[in-house]
Amino acid sequence: MVERQWWQEEVVYQIYPKSFSDSNGDGIGDLKGITERLDYLKDLGITMVWICPIYQSPMDDNGYDISDYKRIAPEYGTMEDLEELVEEAGKRKIKIMLDLVINHTSDEHPWFKEALRDADSPHHEDYIFKKGSRRPNNWRSVFGGSVWEKVPGREEYYLHSFGKKQPDLNWENAGLREKLYEMIDWWLEKGIAGFRIDAITFIKKDLTWRDREADGADGLAQCTKGCRNQPGIGVFLQEMKERTFDRYPCVTVAEAPGVPYEELGEYIGEKGYFSMIFDFRYADLDIASGSGWSKRVPWTIKDLRDKIMASQMALQKWGWSANFIENHDQPRATTKYLRESQQEPEAVKTLAAMYFFLRGLPFIYQGQELGMVNAKRDSIQEFNDISSIDQYERSLAEGCTPEEALHYVNLRSRDNARVPFPWEDGQYGGFTTGKPWIAMAEEYPAVNAKAQVGVEGSIHTFYKEMIYFRQKGPYRECLLYGRIQPIESSADVIAYRRYTDKESICCWSNFSGQTVREPVPKGHTEPVWQSYGKAVLQGESLELGPYQSVLLKQQEIRIKKPVAFSPQTPYNLP
């Protein structure tokens, strides 16, 4: 097990800068906009902010295609704006974590432009090129089409695991790795708290470059079979850790899909490469693994429970987990997990409580605390996300009708989470005084921050109270550091136990619109928190109301000095 670290007590709020708050009226969110909203985050209870890429970029993939690692994208502001944000956040005891994108750059990065201009340039070795008159293999990029793009004027191809304007860096080149390490150190010296590390399990490739069995109508095979979690990746990850992260008191959160549970010790163990990783197994339970969005998979709450608990138990064995239900690459959790109940406030709250009290660090994505739902679009032309456009075309190729293809894209599009944040009910929701870069969600006149902040019973108020209870309540030791154990429950209930040597708290979340009765583990008869109403105990069973979450403490284990508390008043631990 990992010794206690400062970052284990954080609550992280993820910001998509393009869509959070626009300070200058150009329709694009920016750094000054984030600074202006720091008090909102502080009031909510946030202690760390993760900001999606703000580096200079042509924005083909909204910043995940970087053309200069040491410059700020002009639409987001200046380096001085970022420094001001870090300083102002620090005054509010909020830390800033940046995105680190080092599997690929933009094709407009000077290194790649020089590699294209001159095949004998040292920068040619910074990327993955293959000579020949035909594509080297049948791998499909994450965003569709071949991973190989022809170099103009030469019998040569370059590899891109994602978009064709995102050429992969050649991690086999020690000189390239040195340049990346220098850049990482440069940012950490600026005082940021650490990084969320993008697509890091893609940096090692299968160097045989062999064809794989086709898995789509296009005759191609998903590149993850040869570009992700390949043997030998640990050498690169260990070197990066030793040369950069180990030299700073920083936090690192890896986007590491597909890492086998039996290898978690290498990634997050006592000597792991990273502080935490995101586990996507329960995030992608509605689509077939490695397939397109049209390959839908029926699932139940029990399926969700089983995946979450399997993840928690595996991560607990080795270290810390990064718990989330939404991010910039996922649709809204309300729509995905609650389906027909997505507009039911108590259902939204019980979903929040279910994941928030899991073992690990909770991540909140902007707008999640308002209960935002997917933003339905009526034609593919209304989508900005390159992945959504590719999935639409792929669904058509797989035999879907245009209506079906659009339906699947609406369900899974990354644009669902990228709509502008609704601050109020006025024009463009107070996000901007200009025209937003992407259309607002149609719900914003009713679902916005102004309508919920300080309002009793609102989803925002619920999040604020829940954060306070976890962070500063009398059971914080158990809820922050306690171990986790699944509890057997009925089909529509997710239940688990958090416990230390001194405390034991059982957590239930009812995902049905019906009252259900659950057996209570021996001695757990003291209610300490519920999402609404009161906990109803009858003998050795707990009655859960529709969409209700309840926490019960073991009766015979008591804190020395029980104290009443509220989110409005400071709470001093006994």
Image: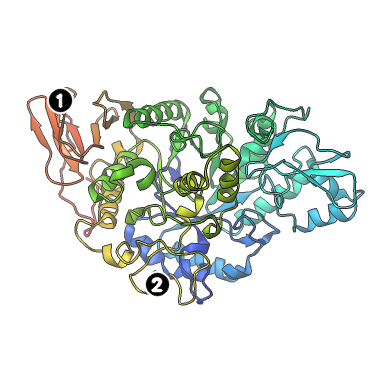
Looking at the image, can residue 296 be seen? yes
Q: Where is residue 416 in the image (x, y as percent from the top left)?
A: 45, 53
Is 76 placed left or right of 441 in the picture? Answer: right
**Which quarter shows the C terminus?**
top left
Q: Where is 171 relative to 499, above or below?
A: below
- Which sits in the foreground, 256 or 483? 256
Q: Where is residue 196 in the image (x, y as percent from the top left)?
A: 54, 47
- The amino acid beneath tag 2 is Gly
Element on which disc 1 rests: loop
Circle 2/circle 1 CB separation < 8 Å? no
Is 37 placed left or right of 218 in the picture? Answer: left
Report crowding for label 1: few under 14, some 14 to 19, many 20 or more residues within 10 A (C-alpha).
Answer: some
Q: Residue furthest left?
A: 539
Is 404 placed left or right of 538 in the picture? Answer: right
- The amino acid beneath tag 1 is Gly
- State which mark lies toward you, 2 or 1: 2
Number of numbered discs overlaid on the protein picture: 2
- Which sits in the foreground, 197 or 410? 410
| Residue pointed to by mark 1 | 523
For marks 2 and 1 on the same chain, the one whose residue lies earlier in the sequence: 2
Q: Where is residue 393 in the image (x, y as percent from the top left)?
A: 60, 46
- Res. 337 image quadrant: top left
- Res. 186 image quadrant: bottom right
Q: Where is 158 relative to 496, above or below?
A: below
For the residues marked 2 and 1, what is the alpha-carbon distance in whole angstroms? 50 Å
Q: Position of residue 387 (x, y in %)?
A: 58, 48
Element on which disc 2 rests: helix
Residue 374 is marked as none
Question: Residue drawn at (53%, 67%), measured in percent from left and top?
Answer: 437
| Residue pointed to by mark 2 | 430
